[in-house]
Image (spheres, rainbow, N blue to C red):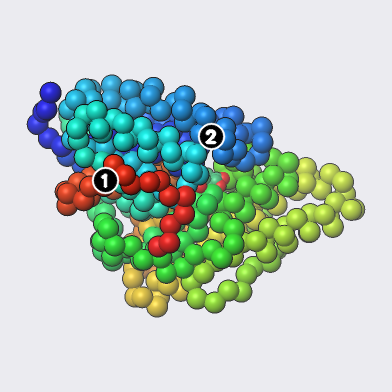
Amino acid sequence: MKSEGCFILGIESSCDDTSSAVLRDGILLSNVTASQAVHEAYGGVVPELASRAHQQNIVPVVDAALKQAGIEREQLSAIAFTRGPGLMGSLLVGVSFAKGLAASLGIPMIDVNHLHGHVLAHFIKEEQGAGGKVQENAMQESGKPLAPCSLPPVPQFPFLCLLVSGGNSQIILVKSYKEMEIIGQTIDDAAGEAIDKCSKVMGLGYPGGPIIDKLARQGNPDAFTFSKPNIPGYDYSFSGLKTSFLYKLRDWMKDDADFIEHHKEDLAASLEKTIVDILMKKLRLAAKDLKIKQVAVAGGVSANTGLRNAFHDYAKRYGWKVFIPRFSYTTDNAAMIAIAGYFKYLDKDFCPMSAPAYSRVAT
Ligand code: KG4
């Protein structure tokens, strides 16, 4: 049963979220994600448990995405899937599922780089209710979502994108939907990883990002100072900050065993401020050097309130036009994989059945 329009099924399984989405002619019809609570007890993602959970979740998640989109799988035009980077055991579940489904339906497959997906989340357009109105996934500098029927601008090429997640901290020069150049990246830990580790040291839950964010709203960001890296160019480093946080806590706890409990809001606010300052300083340097004023943020850490506020502040101070994704598109999701796949579909840029998953990417 083939029907009018181009229907793309997106599949994401690179870490601990199993997600599936459906697009019709580039417009999002559904985006269903199953997260994995099993990792909370371990304070981090356990790869073996993640791939097992993907195995359990993938069929119901894809079924739900098709159902919500109101289509049958026979109507699909192509399947876009995350091929890498990510956890190999997790990726293999999504990649194998995509291959099996594409082969059974006789439709092309489109491989998507997970990091490109995060960047292209800024181009997701949603169908709003029965009226079929379309809203692009962007916010204006005010930070307020636009009315559902308006079409706000999407970033214009070339733009800079700060990609910050649990596994990556990169500044990407986005030249087109397909051409992206990493001009700066962390030489050790990612920003999200540093937040999660510091949160763990404080005895808070996992993932630490949302908890630190919440506590930081009630704390004084200038209460404590932690070490900041001195790295050349646009690269980042967060391992020194992590160590500084740990050592300072250890010293303070010698005098007050309950130091964390007594100061957790100020600790969270000061940690958040340090990380945001580090991220924004290099981003500002890159924007200045390259004379680019269109600046976007993506990845799980882009949900952070302090970072979002800093973007709005820089928009005012430096005349940037900033693009901040909706919360639902900050963390891993298949809508971003489907939109990245759609752009490749328009170019007939398909991938062979033999294409393997990859855990790391060179570019
Ligand atoms: O992009 P993502 O969902 O997964 C990958 O790492 O690929 O990012 C997860 C990261 C975690 O480190 C989490 O703690 C962080 O994003 N995060 C946040 C917030 N929400 C999630 N960090 C700071 N503030 C938040 N509100």
Ligand 1 has an atom within 8 Å of the beta carbon of the residue at disc 1:
no
Disc 1 marks which residue?
352
Question: In the image, is 50 to the left or to the right of 99?
Answer: right
Residue 80 in percent (x, y) is at 29, 41
Q: Which mark is residue 153?
A: none
Residue at the limit of the structure toward the front, as seen here: 354
- Which label lies toward us, 2 or 1? 1
Q: Which mark is residue 50?
A: 2
User: As displayed, is residue 223 above or below residue 301?
Assistant: below
- Residue drawn 26% across the image and 47% down it: 351
Of the image marks 2 and 1, the number of the one nearer the N terminus: 2
Residue 5 in percent (x, y) is at 12, 35
Quarter holding the C terminus is: bottom left
- Residue drawn 57% across the image and 35% down it: 48
Residue 51 in percent (x, y) is at 51, 34
Question: Identity of the amino acid at label 1?
Answer: Pro
Question: In the image, is 169 to the left or to the right of 41?
Answer: left
- Residue drawn 57% across the image and 42% down it: 210
